[in-house]
Amino acid sequence: MPVGVGIVAIRVPEALGRIALRALDEQRPKVAVGPVILNHLVNAVEFIVPASPALWPGSDIVRLDGRLNSTRTVRVPPLGCRGSGREWLRTPQAAAGKRPVLTDPHHLARALATARGRFPLGSPIR
């Protein structure tokens, strides 16, 4: 999946990502959740979101683990199965003739903040 100028991948530790995904599902009013990958190779969850300079600075980057990275693609598993140590937690969804739905980065930032709050102070995830 190409990423870069308009789309970024946000990688977080698996425990944090699973809680954030639950928080996204629980947000009211209901919010759309875009593609989410569970990456078993690095025990992480990867959210594919539109680039948002206000939250993730830069216009031609991929943001992974809080670091800037020059990668231009994210490996994705085949739809409907696991592949290469990755599996879909949320598959890409699109209406006929439309672009796939992506998670709003502001909603993701709020969900990640909520998730971090569920870990004790001093935890490596906080």
Image: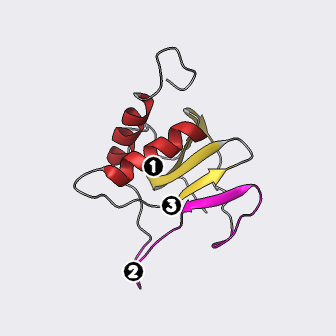
Q: Give how far across and how far down residue 106 sits, in percent.
A: 33, 45
Callout 1 secondary element: helix
Q: Mark 1 or mark 3: which is in front?
A: 1
Closer to the N terminus: mark 3 or mark 2? 3
Looking at the rendered structure, which numbered label has been put on residue 95? 2
- What's the amino acid at mark 3? Pro
- Do residues under tags 1 and 3 come within 8 Å of each other at their CB atoms? no
Looking at the rendered structure, the secondary structure element under dot 2 is loop
The answer to whether residue 113 of the structure is visible from this angle is yes
Distance from Cα at disc 3 to Cα at disc 2: 14 Å
Mark 2: few/some/many CA within 10 Å (<14, 14-19, 20+)? few
What residue span does the magenta drawing correspond to? 78-99
Q: Which residue is mark 1?
A: 21
How far apart are labels 1 and 3 at the CA level?
11 Å
**Magenta region includes residue 83:** yes
Front residue (pair 107, 82): 82
Q: Secondary structure at mark 3?
A: loop
On whether residue 72 falls in the magenta region, the answer is no
> Can residue 53 be seen?
no
**Is tag 1's residue or tag 3's residue first in the polypeptide sequence?**
1
Q: Residue, x 52% and y 47% (percent of image)?
A: 60
Most common SS among magenta residues: loop
Q: Which residue is pictured at 75% across the width and 55% down the height?
A: 85
For marks 1 and 2, the one nearer the N-term is: 1
115 relative to 22, above or below:
above
Label number found at residue 35: 3
Choose top left, top right, bottom left or bottom right for residue 68: top right
Residue type for callout 1: Leu
Front of the two marks 1 and 2: 1
